[in-house]
Structures are given as structure tokens and as C-alpha cells.
Image: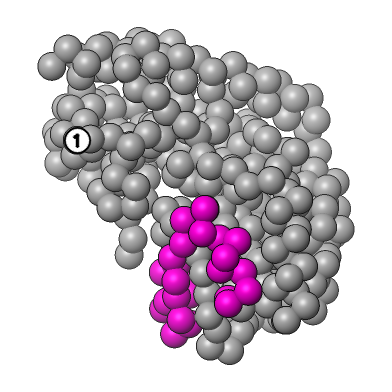
């Protein structure tokens, strides 16, 4: 299995700390407050809820969406829907994409953002993460739609992973996900801070959505996940407040890093920079009970999320100061 954020048990085993600040995942530290659920959410088999799909379509602006057990479920399933294909995945990006296509025997190529345009015409599938995880790079929607049209004319796919797209809605191409050749992935885990629900959505043309639904089988999303997410997706007041707060926190993080000589890119939910000594930086932070994300190969850098409270911001500031003074 590939490396991901979280894993505080591993952090405690390696460093012996117990009072951890987990900045390794890029998840909203002030997640949506899950409501008390009706008993049938736990008792009944979780049949698909049209109200959940409608709420998701309204929130994401998409014509049709299939709920899945986290976008990871779709990432692993989509390569199984195609014959052996030439697949280009943007790099560095979320490593599960390349891993899933390679595991299913497709011909894989990795390409930087600068090289993606040249890869469209000699690929049958192109996968991009927008905004990119971990670097925060973005691609204009107009460019993505043009790529999708070129691929779609040949029966190809452009897969756009918008897991971190909630903090920049203008980047989204979800509204166009019904057109042939375009597949859009959205996640409830990041902006809503509900990663434990394991819930995401796939937008695509009707034929692709039916094929994906048949492949995934029944009861893919739990009843409790459907109930909590349905309420979160309809709670406009919470969404507005969370969006505004994340913009403020994102600017604060960028300013804090710059104060300590770190010029980072990213999104309001996380920041990333190429670090000359990423292993040493990661160990330095871990020794102070701060768990950030180390990238040893893809980009060789550090990704850091948002603290949950003022005490966490202060500890981060002190740890960064100690790093810059070393």
C-alpha cells in the first residue's frame, strides 16, 4: 500500500510523542458537526437516496453524480472499465491514480503539467488533479474542457480529480461532466472535514456512470454516511462560514511560512514546498509533536495542513522558528 497522511499510531511508535498536531492530511480541521442520526440509518440496508444525489448535484453544479465510498473507490475502479489503454497521469500528484492504472495492466506514462498538452493526442486516458495534490498547481477549466473534447472524440477519457476543489469553485469542470470524455471526482472528506465517512462522487456521462455503478455493486455507501453528507451538502450557512474561515487560515499559513523563509504554494487547506532536506525537516517537526507530510520522491518536499486551534498555530510557529535557527 502507498504512503498517505494520517497514521498517528505510526508517528507515536516512531517518535514516542502522544500530544500530536496532525497537519499531514490537508483536511479541514473544523469539520462539519455530524448530527444525531435516525435509527434506520444504522439498521436498514443503505439503498441509494435520490435526495443525496440531488443535494450533491446542487452543491457541485453537476448534471448527474454517482455516490461512491470515497473517491478512492472510483480511482481503483475506473481502470477496470477500459481495455488496455495508454494512460498519462500528471506528476507529481496523488499517487493512487498512477498506481491503480498500472495495477490493471495499462501502459502508464507520467507527465509534468507543462507536458500534459503534448500527451493528449497520444493517450487514451489522461488523469489530472486540480488543484493538484500535493503542489497546489492549477489548470484553467477552459483548457481541461478542450482536452476532454479531444480525448472524447476518440473514445478517450480526461479524469479530473477535484478532491480539493471546494475552496476554489471557479476551477471546477463538474458542470460539464455529462459530456463524453470527461470524468470528474469530488470528495466530501476535505472541505467538510468528514474523511471518516468515506464518501465521494463521480460525474460522467450516463453510460460510464451505469458501468461504474454495476462494477461497484450494491450498498457501496453506508446509511450513516448518506445521512450526514446529505445534511452537510444542504447546509449553506455552514458552507459559507467554512469557506470564509479557510480563506483566512490559508492566508495565515502562507504568511507564517514566509516569515520563516519558506515560499510555499498550495490551497487554503494545505501548503507545499520543495524542501532541500525534507527528511530532516519532517523529523524536526515530529520531534516536536507536529506530524506533516513528507514526500521523498514525488517533488521531494513537504506538505502541511492547518492547525485546529491557536495553541496549534503557536506550536507550529515555534517549531518553524527552531528550524530556521538551526
Identify the element where label 1 is drawn: loop
> In this view of the protein, which residue sits in the foreground, 121 or 325?
121
Residue 16 percent across, percent down from the top left? 14, 33
Whether residue 265 is visible? yes
Residue 110 appears left or right of 162: left
Q: In this view, does 39 lie above or below 322?
A: below
Q: In this view, does 239 lie above or below 47?
A: above
Residue under the image location 64 percent in, 42 percent down:
165
> In this view of the protein, which residue sits in the foreground, 296 or 186?
296
Quadrant holding the C terminus: top left
Residue 110 lies in the magenta-colored region: yes
Residue under the image location 61 percent in, 22 percent down:
247
Q: Mark 1 points at which residue?
A: 277
> In this view of the protein, which residue sits in the foreground, 36 or 263?
263
Residue under the image location 75 percent in, 74 percent down:
152
Image: magenta residue range: 97-123
Residue 194 percent across, percent down from the top left? 57, 41
Residue 178 appears left or right of 290: right
Residue 122 percent across, percent down from the top left? 58, 77
Amino acid at each position: 500500500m502507498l504512503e498517505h497522511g494520517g497514521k498517528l499510531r505510526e508517528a507515536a511508535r516512531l517518535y514516542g510523542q502522544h500530544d500530536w498536531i496532525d497537519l499531514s492530511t490537508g483536511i479541514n480541521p473544523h469539520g462539519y458537526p455530524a448530527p444525531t442520526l435516525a435509527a434506520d440509518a444504522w439498521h436498514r440496508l443503505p439503498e441509494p437516496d435520490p435526495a443525496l444525489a440531488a443535494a450533491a448535484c446542487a452543491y457541485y453544479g453537476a448534471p448527474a453524480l454517482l455516490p461512491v465510498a470515497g473517491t478512492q473507490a472510483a480511482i481503483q475502479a475506473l481502470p477496470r472499465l477500459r481495455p488496455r489503454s495508454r494512460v498519462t497521469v500528471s506528476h507529481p500528484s496523488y499517487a493512487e491514480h498512477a498506481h491503480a492504472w498500472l495495477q490493471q495492466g495499462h501502459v502508464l506514462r507520467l507527465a509534468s503539467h507543462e507536458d500534459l498538452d503534448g500527451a493528449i493526442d497520444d493517450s487514451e486516458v489522461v488523469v489530472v488533479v486540480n488543484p493538484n495534490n500535493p503542489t497546489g498547481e492549477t489548470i484553467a477549466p477552459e483548457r481541461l474542457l478542450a482536452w476532454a473534447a479531444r480525448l472524447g472524440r476518440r473514445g478517450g477519457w480526461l479524469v479530473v480529480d477535484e478532491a480539493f476543489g471546494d475552496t476554489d469553485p471557479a476551477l471546477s469542470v463538474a458542470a460539464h461532466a455529462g459530456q463524453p470524455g470527461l470524468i470528474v471526482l469530488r470528495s466530501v472528506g476535505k472541505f467538510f472535514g468528514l474523511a471518516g465517512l468515506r464518501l465521494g462522487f463521480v460525474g460522467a456521462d450516463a453510460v460510464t456512470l451505469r458501468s461504474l455503478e454495476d462494477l461497484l455493486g450494491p450498498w457501496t455507501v453506508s446509511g450513516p454516511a448518506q445521512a450526514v453528507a446529505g445534511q452537510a451538502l444542504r447546509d449553506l450557512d455552514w458552507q459559507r462560514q467554512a469557506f470564509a474561515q479557510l480563506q483566512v487560515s490559508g492566508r495565515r499559513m502562507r504568511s507564517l511560512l514566509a516569515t520563516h523563509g519558506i515560499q510555499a504554494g498550495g490551497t487554503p487547506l494545505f501548503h507545499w514546498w520543495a524542501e532541500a532536506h525534507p527528511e530532516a525537516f519532517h523529523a524536526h517537526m515530529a520531534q516536536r509533536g507536529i506530524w506533516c507530510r513528507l514526500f521523498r520522491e514525488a517533488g521531494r518536499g513537504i506538505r502541511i495542513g492547518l492547525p485546529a486551534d491557536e495553541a496549534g498555530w503557536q506550536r507550529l510557529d515555534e517549531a518553524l522558528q527552531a528550524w530556521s535557527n538551526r
